[in-house]
Image (tube, helix red, strand yellow):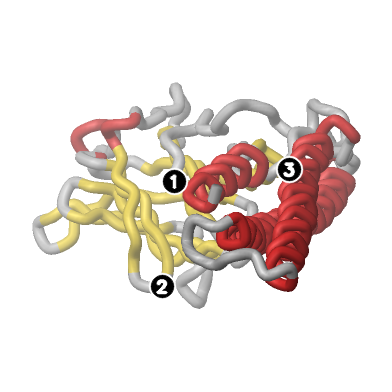
Amino acid sequence: MKKHCLPILLGLFWIVYCPAQNLYPLDTATDSFHIRVVAAQNRLALEWLDRAANGARKRDFMTVTDIRLDDADLVLTYAPEKVKKYFLLSVGISLRTDEGGEIFEPKANETVESDAPGGKQITLLDGTERTLELGRTYTLYVRKSLLGPVACDKPRPVFTVAKQLPYYGVAVVGGVFMGFAALYATQSTDANDNYTRLWKEGEPGGQDSEAARFLTKAQDKKKAARICGWTGAAILAADAFFYGKKWFRFREKQRIYDKFCGKKPAELGIVPNGLGVGLAYKF
């Protein structure tokens, strides 16, 4: 019995308490930055034309701290704002010349996402070869999407009876273990009573005697009762803990839904990278 308890527990907890976490777009904002390609010390460089006096610009979800050329690569450096856990910030970039024309949207293999001192950065590889030309001005679009654990195109999250059923099922399993513990405890008591009765009646001793068999049975059933009792108690305690955690998680989802989905329709999609390849940064 004991060797089967751990696999049962692990299997139950994995099925019930480890569901996949999906993220959905809740709020989207796009900033634009004006840049010019210039020559500096016989090399191409970028002028950030609308750069703030302090060298950084804070907007929705992040602060852009630098836009520059690193050899032929365009590098955007930013510091993401801290948001609540369970959220994800997805960032994408694109370019368009100020003379008009189509928006250049980088493909997946044309960008690199990496950490930077004090934040993150997106690098458009070979930007001067792909779209940037000396003497021309461009608008750099930075699209930011805040992803969260609720979908605004679906009903408000509710901890329904159907979603509670797995927890009830685990509780039933814990109750079964407790039932076996009570049964084994009764059998142990009965066996011990028989052993005591035979001992008082002067039953001959020895390993093969009836009294010895009752004593062994009493000890084995007592051990089994202890194992099942602790296992059942552990299952019920863990189930109650995760049930409460899940209930509070649904309350949090409802607050998020009311805040974002009740305010305005969200731009829906799997991963909102419509203006370029996104950089995901988890908080």
Q: Amino acid at mark 3?
A: Val
In the image as oriented, which residue stretches furthest toward the bottom?
54
Say whether marks 1 and 3 touch (CB < 8 Å): no
Looking at the picture, how far across and down is residue 216, in whole percent? 57, 60
Camera-side residue of 255 and 202: 202
Q: Residues within 10 Å of mark 3 (few under 14, many from 20)?
A: some
Q: Residues within 10 Å of mark 1 (few under 14, many from 20)?
A: many
Q: Residues within 10 Å of mark 2 (few under 14, many from 20)?
A: few
Q: Amino acid at mark 1?
A: Leu
- For image coordinates 77% across by 38% down, the residue present is 169
Q: Quick check: 215 left or right of 105?
A: right
As measured in the structure, the alpha-carbon distance from the residue carrying label 3 to the one carrying label 2 is: 50 Å
Q: Amino acid at mark 2?
A: Gly
- The residue that disc 2 covers is 118
Q: Which mark is residue 279?
A: 1
- For image coordinates 79% across by 42% down, the residue present is 172
Camera-side residue of 157 and 109: 157
Q: Nearer the viewer, mark 1 or mark 3?
A: 3
Q: Earlier in the sequence, mark 1 or mark 2?
A: 2
In the image as oriented, which residue stretches furthest toward the top?
102
